[in-house]
Amino acid sequence: MNILITQVSKFGALCWIKCLKRISNMHIVLYGIDICAKGECAGSQLVDYYFEVDSTLNKEQYLDYIENICSTSQIDLLLSVMDNELSCLIQSKRFDKIMFCPTLDIFSIFHDKFIASKEIQKLGLDIPPIIENPFGEHKVIIRDRIGIGSRGIYIIDLEKEQYIENRFQKSRFMQQYISGDEYTVDVFNDKGGKPVVIVPRKRLEIRQGISFISEIVQDDELIEICKKIYSSFKIPGISNIQFIKNDSGIYFIELNTRIGGTTIASVLSGFNFIELYLQHFVQNKKIESFPFYQNLFAWGSIISRDYEEYIYLA
């Protein structure tokens, strides 16, 4: 099975690579692309074949470049981990046979964090209240509507900083600051968008938006909320949802229609559902029901991560 992963310098791409390399009963050949020279990012050394992309290519030239690799290398599966790129790939419709993504309409909803919050609220679920006027608030969050990870998120303590006009733009929106435990839920849905695997992770230590220590928790309340969301929005394949939970309730933060940079934590907890993903989407194999797979995880396990170093000898 030939798999092409774009932007292999990113955490999400490294997660795909780590998960795929743990599969021993399939012959998988990994291809990777990025703008950095080989050796300048770890991902370039972890794939079997690496291609350095000319950073001056425009969008159409870049799509042509990817399409050429897919054709000449007989790629069976194309994986993208960055939302802006994913949007272009979905819109082009060139890769529909080797990409398994939501429709452009559903992708666009969750690509815009403001629209996503409004849509989730329509389901009767809680979100941090959206604020138009911060008067009377002690602390607020200003977020980019189109953001990635922790970038574009500003926590403003109004008792210390009175003037927030320089932070607020039309491309951003404001929410009430909600404190509590942070959770990321990794989800694998079948071709019809029905959940097969739902794994909540409590984020115990976070560095620059990336979880370094996680606890795998069988939180039935979170799992049921995820089922409710995915019954309304059909998102095939791998995705993740972030929540904040406190004594007042559970608050939806965002849904990413792609793999998370720390999804490997859920895989390590006992079941490599990335292998199941390949079997179902690429090999068209049938899969078991939701309860069967949920019983395969080591609930309560703690997963920690660290950086690794790689040397490239040209």
Image (cartoon, rainbow, N blue to C red):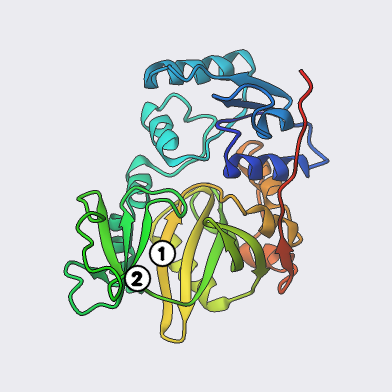
Check the picture and name the quadrant holding the C terminus.
Answer: top right
Residue beneath label 2, please? Answer: 127
Residue at the limit of the structure toward the right, as seen here: 24
Residue beneath label 1, please? Answer: 253
Characterize the local packing of mark 1: few (<14), some (14-19) or many (20 or more) Cα atoms within 10 angstroms: some
Mark 2 element type: loop
Residue 63 versus residue 126 in the image, above or below: above
Mark 1 element type: strand
Q: At x 51% / y 47%, what residue is drawn?
A: 258
Marking on residue 173? none
Whole-percent x, y for residue 189 in the image: 55, 53
Q: At x 62% / y 54%, what residue is drawn?
A: 262
Amino acid at pointer 2:
Ile
Residue 29 appears anywhere in the view:
no
Whole-percent x, y for residue 108 in the image: 33, 45
Residue at the limit of the structure toward the front, as seen here: 160
Contact flag, marks 1 and 2 (Cβ < 8 Å): yes
* Quarter-of-image position of residue 141: bottom left
Q: Is residue 60 left or right of residue 270?
A: left
* Quarter-of-image position of residue 173: bottom left
Q: Nearer the viewer, residue 261 or 25?
A: 261
Residue 114 appears anywhere in the view:
yes
Whole-percent x, y for residue 113 in the image: 34, 55
Amino acid at pointer 1:
Ile
Whole-percent x, y for residue 190 in the image: 56, 51
Q: At x 55% / y 30%, what residue is drawn?
A: 98
Q: Earlier in the sequence, mark 1 or mark 2?
A: 2
Check the picture and name the quadrant holding the N terminus.
Answer: top right
